[in-house]
Every structure is written in structure tokens, then in C-alpha cells.
Image: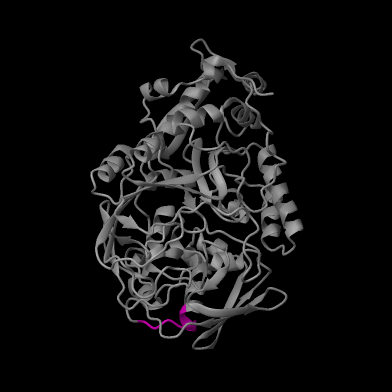
């Protein structure tokens, strides 16, 4: 039974007083979703929440400004893993296949049709004719081969796309418009991975022309074309007048309705909110939780809650640094950090608690690990005592003359979460230093292990992509807990190529139990992205994994 200790409770008023903004905007590291191998099968998981399907024709013309909570690092699908990059890239690129946001089946994209061999190792795609990249380069099978070969090339150092092609062996150009992709092993997530923008097809001509600067000069086949990127200010994309090859589930054909979209990264919650309410911004993502209900009740805006599957918003504990190199200290956090109070204080109770590495609306979610670490202050204190951390005269625990002090490194918009964690761990005798930084610095420090605690969520329709944050191959990447465990790696590797759904579910459950038994991370809440949309914006809806909007369909009233 959970124990509640009144000194550890934190009121919203007290939370704001100690330095929070009253709300935090969430930024997830995006990960391509995955699904069973059948080319047209929908994932057998609860359907993610999306905005209503678009209906009716829109009026061509006009432009919008879209506020994100950080600036992307790159617009090269092969060289980024950020949600903000995905937001922009969805408009610039097309994929071989698309996933319908309503029935979740795979539909034609740059590939008109496809077929697979019974062993799941060979996949042949008949490509769409008459498609050109924004620079005039013709789309063909050579472009498919060039992109996929580049992604898996170690020199590319792909942080995300390469994991979606982990089983890739080669692409054979059968003829100009037929590409045969061969895999080394079965890959249960292959078709879903192909439907994600991480595996979008870029212009090989532009990649060669710009080299390492391609991410700042992206060229795709999508409904919008890149115009400019002014660092720390804006990214501008404009209508592709030749676009006529969108997926069949979109609400119109031909060019996009909007003439221009300007993406701006505003990390500070108040500034982003002010820009939206003033009318300077027409679409705002990561609405501060404390303002969401107010904006909704005003009746002035369209407010959208886009629940996402994948991995919950999670705190990762750096196991290479003391004190988290001691499992007893990690278990003290698992029992001693009250996630309900954290959600109430930092997120105004808007999200549901999560206590496993896989969100409860995700394929193969297992309940076996649910409730493994109930909130229990006394048990948490006992773990710290067993680890040698004794209460000091000022309340901070001490061991061998060193105080129990940890750095929680996070994005500026996450600061309320970090401040709430600081307050909730203080009664345990743990001092948490708040390190609220810009996105690039935060990610770099996470990759290098320069801190004790980090947090992010993983947007994913299939649980297999948790390898991005738990597999040792991603040490130096998003393996922010610095896990190096051969048994866990094997579970994650084996599930990726297991075609039998029952066996795959069992492997994922073993991976989850391994993570939880070792207390490598602390799941907080089931992730959702909150959007505020101007009433002038019509036909706003989101991608199947809930977080990325289809701006091709958007028009202005």
C-alpha cells in the first residue's frame, strides 16, 4: 500500500512560489513508430488520440506561423532524432508509404504498390512516376537506394533513421521505377518504419551538393519547399506548386492550401503563450498545462490533446555517476519520488501516471511491471540508509564527507518539472540542482553523461523503438541512463526480428522487467502534446502517433 507523508506534499501555490512557471511544455525525442510486418496490417494497439479527420475543401492562400518549444538541430532525416525536426520535415518530404491516421493501414506514397516474400526478407516497391524533387531531380529507384545506403553508412552517424534500417542489407535497382529492398533478418517494424519521415526520400543531388550542410538546405518531394532558415529565429517553407502525389487519405489533391508556413522555436513558456494569444502565432504546440483549461474555457481557440503511444515521459538516471551507480539509490528514487504529486504540481494533474517504460496505449504494453515501485517514503529512506547515505545536520544526506547532491539537466520549458522534483526529493535528504538549458546543450550533456538526471519521452506506435533509449548501441546517444547490459540488448534485438506476436510480446515484457528490476529509469506520465490553434485555422489534425500535425490539409478561413 502506498504511504503518503504530508511533509512531502507540494501544493501548486508553494510550487509556483519556489520558482516554477506553474506549467511545463513537453518536448519529446521523436522515434519512428513500428508495427507488425504485414504490409497493410494496422497495429493491434489502442488507436492514438488525434484531432478529427479533415472535411471539406479549404481555401487556397495565406500563411501561418507555428510555434514549437525548440529549434531543430537539422532538417536531414538521416541526421536528427528531434520532434521539432519531424514537425518541419513532414512538410518537406514524402515517404515510400503512409499510415492512414483513421484506419492505421498503410497506403501508397512514393511507392504505388509493394509486395513481400513469405520469409519477410525481400520487399519490392513499384514507384510512382512523374515525381520530382524540389530541385528538379527526378525521383526513381536510384534515389531510394542512395538514401537508404546513406542512412546505414557509419559515416552518416544517423541517430535515429539507422535504427529503423537496422536489418537493412541492400537496395537493388530492378529498373527505373522498381526498387527491391533486401533485409538481413526479419524486421517486425519494417513497414511502419518506412511510413515515418525518418526514412523519407531526399534529393541525392542536394545531398551531394551541400554535403554536411544538407540539413540546413533540405530538398524533398513534399507539399512544401524549403525557403530559409534564420538561426534562432525562424524556418520558412513555401508551397510546392507541382505537388500532386499525396496519400489517398488526405482531404484534397494537388498543392497545399497554405502559401507559406513559418516555424519559430520559442522555448520560454510565457513568450510562446503571449505570441499565441496576441495572434502573432496561429498554431502553438506544448501549451503550458496551467493555461490549457483557461484557453479552452475562453472559447476563443481550438484546443487539442494529442495522446501519443510509445514510452512515457521518463527520468533517466546516469548509472555511471555516483550516487546512481548504486541500485539502492536508484530504488530510493523509485519509491521516494511521488509521481502523483509531481504531475499535480508541475502539470496541473493533466496527465495520467505511468510506471513502466512502455505507455499503456502502446502495442504489447505489459501490466506485469505495473505497481512494482509504490510510493513509500520509509522504504526509500531505508534504501538510502543501506547505501550508506546518512542524514546530515542540515537535512541533506552525507556519505564519506560528500553530500547527496544531483544535477537534473533539462530543457528550459521543462523547468517546472525539475523544480517540482527538487521539492519532492528534499524530504529524502537529496538536493537536486536545477539545470534548465537550451535544447542543444541539454541533448549534448545527455549524450555525454554530464549530469545525473535527464528526462524525455519517446513518441512511438510500437514499443520496440525503446532501444533508442535503453540499448547499449546508443550509449553516447539517447541512452541517457548509460546502460550497458548484454541481456537487455539481446531482448531488444530479438524482439525486433520476431514475427510471432506472442513471442515478441514476451521478449518485450522481459526487457521491461529487466529495466524496472534495475531501476534504470523513473516513468512519470503518459505523454500527450497540447495544441492551441487559432479559430481561423481549418482542418487541423495530427499524425497517427498523435504529436505531428498534417499542415498540408490546413487552410485559413
Q: Residue furthest top?
A: 393
Which of the 4 quarters of the picture holds residue 133?
Answer: bottom left
Taking the spot 54% from the left edge, 38% from the top edge, the residue there is 525
Magenta span:
137-143
Side of 474 where 211 appears, left or right:
left
**Of residues 372 and 529, which is closer to you in this image?**
529
Nearer to me, 530 or 96: 530
Rendering quarter of residue 239: bottom left
- Figure quadrant of the N terminus: top right
Nearest the eye: 330 or 400: 330
Q: Which x, y percent locates residue 238?
A: 28, 67
Query: Which quadrant of the structure image shows residue 549?
Result: bottom left
Residue 535 lies, in percent from the top left, at: 31, 51
Q: Position of residue 57 (x, y in %)?
A: 36, 68
Indicate the quadrant containing the C terminus: top left, top right, bottom left or bottom right.
Answer: bottom left
Tell me: residue 397, above or below residue 49.
above
* Res 75 visible: no
Residue 140 shown in magenta:
yes
Q: Is residue 435 left or right of residue 555?
A: right
Estimate the x, y position of residue 509 in percent, counting from the top left.
71, 48
Question: Is 146 colored magenta in this rendering?
Answer: no
Q: Residue at x 58, y 16 (%)?
A: 5
Amino acid at each position: 500500500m502506498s504511504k503518503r507523508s504530508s511533509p512531502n506534499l507540494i501544493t501548486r501555490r508553494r510550487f509556483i512560489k519556489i520558482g516554477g512557471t506553474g506549467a511545463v511544455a513537453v518536448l519529446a525525442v521523436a522515434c519512428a513508430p513500428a508495427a507488425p510486418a504485414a504490409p497493410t496490417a494496422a497495429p493491434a494497439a489502442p488507436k492514438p488520440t488525434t484531432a478529427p479527420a479533415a472535411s471539406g475543401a479549404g481555401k487556397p492562400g495565406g500563411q501561418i506561423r507555428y510555434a514549437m518549444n525548440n529549434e531543430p538541430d537539422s532538417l536531414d532525416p538521416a541526421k536528427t532524432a528531434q520532434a521539432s525536426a519531424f514537425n518541419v520535415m513532414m512538410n518537406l518530404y514524402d515517404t515510400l508509404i503512409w499510415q492512414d491516421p483513421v484506419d492505421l493501414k498503410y497506403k501508397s506514397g512514393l511507392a504505388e504498390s509493394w509486395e513481400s516474400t513469405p520469409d519477410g526478407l525481400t520487399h519490392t516497391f513499384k514507384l510512382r512516376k512523374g515525381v520530382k524533387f524540389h530541385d528538379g531531380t527526378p525521383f526513381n529507384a536510384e534515389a531510394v537506394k542512395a538514401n537508404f545506403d546513406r542512412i546505414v553508412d557509419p559515416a552518416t552517424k544517423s541517430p535515429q533513421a539507422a535504427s529503423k534500417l537496422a536489418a537493412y542489407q541492400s537496395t537493388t535497382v530492378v529498373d527505373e521505377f522498381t526498387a527491391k529492398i533486401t533485409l538481413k533478418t526479419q524486421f517486425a517494424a519494417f513497414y511502419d518504419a518506412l511510413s515515418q519521415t525518418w526514412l523519407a526520400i531526399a534529393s541525392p543531388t542536394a545531398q551531394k551538393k551541400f554535403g554536411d550542410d544538407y540539413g540546413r538546405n533540405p530538398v524533398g518531394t513534399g507539399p512544401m519547399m524549403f525557403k530559409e532558415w534564420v538561426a534562432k529565429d525562424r524556418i520558412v517553407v513555401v508551397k510546392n506548386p507541382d505537388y500532386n502525389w499525396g496519400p489517398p487519405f488526405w482531404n484534397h489533391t494537388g498543392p497545399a492550401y497554405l502559401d507559406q508556413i513559418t516555424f519559430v522555436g520559442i522555448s520560454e513558456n510565457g513568450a510562446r503563450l503571449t505570441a499565441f494569444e496576441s495572434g502573432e502565432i496561429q498554431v502553438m504546440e506544448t501549451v503550458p498545462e496551467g493555461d490549457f483549461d483557461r484557453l479552452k474555457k475562453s472559447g476563443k481557440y481550438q484546443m487539442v490533446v494529442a495522446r501519443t503511444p510509445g514510452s512515457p515521459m521518463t527520468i533517466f538516471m546516469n548509472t555511471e555517476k555516483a550516487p546512481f551507480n548504486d541500485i539502492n539509490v536508484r530504488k530510493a528514487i523509485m519509491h521516494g519520488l511521488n509521481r502523483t504529486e509531481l504531475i499535480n504540481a508541475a502539470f496541473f494533474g493533466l496527465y495520467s501516471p505511468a510506471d513502466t517504460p512502455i505507455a499503456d496505449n502502446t502495442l504489447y504494453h505489459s501490466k506485469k511491471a505495473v505497481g512494482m515501485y509504490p510510493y513509500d517514503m520509509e522504504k526509500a529512506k531505508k534504501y538510502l540508509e543501506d547505501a550508506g547515505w546518512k542524514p546530515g545536520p542540515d537535512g541533506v544526506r552525507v556519505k564519506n564527507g560528500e553530500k547527496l547532491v544531483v544535477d537534473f539537466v533539462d530543457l528550459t520549458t521543462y523547468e517546472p518539472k525539475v523544480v517540482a522534483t527538487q521539492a519532492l526529493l528534499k524530504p529524502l535528504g537529496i538536493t537536486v540542482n536545477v539545470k534548465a538549458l537550451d535544447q542543444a546543450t541539454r541533448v549534448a550533456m545527455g549524450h555525454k553523461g554530464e549530469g545525473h538526471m535527464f528526462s524525455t519521452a519517446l513518441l512511438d506506435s510500437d514499443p520496440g523503438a525503446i532501444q533508442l533509449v535503453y540499448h547499449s548501441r546508443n550509449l553516447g546517444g539517447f541512452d541517457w541512463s548509460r546502460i550497458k547490459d548484454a541481456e537487455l540488448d539481446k531482448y531488444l534485438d530479438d524482439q525486433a526480428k520476431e514475427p510471432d506476436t506472442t513471442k515478441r510480446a514476451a521478449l518485450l515484457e522481459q526487457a521491461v522487467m529487466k529495466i524496472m528490476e534495475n531501476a534504470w529509469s523513473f516513468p512519470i506520465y503518459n505523454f500527450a502534446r497540447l495544441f492551441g490553434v487559432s479559430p481561423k485555422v481549418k482542418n487541423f489534425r495530427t499524425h497517427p502517433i498523435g504529436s505531428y500535425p498534417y499542415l498540408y490539409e490546413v487552410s485559413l478561413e
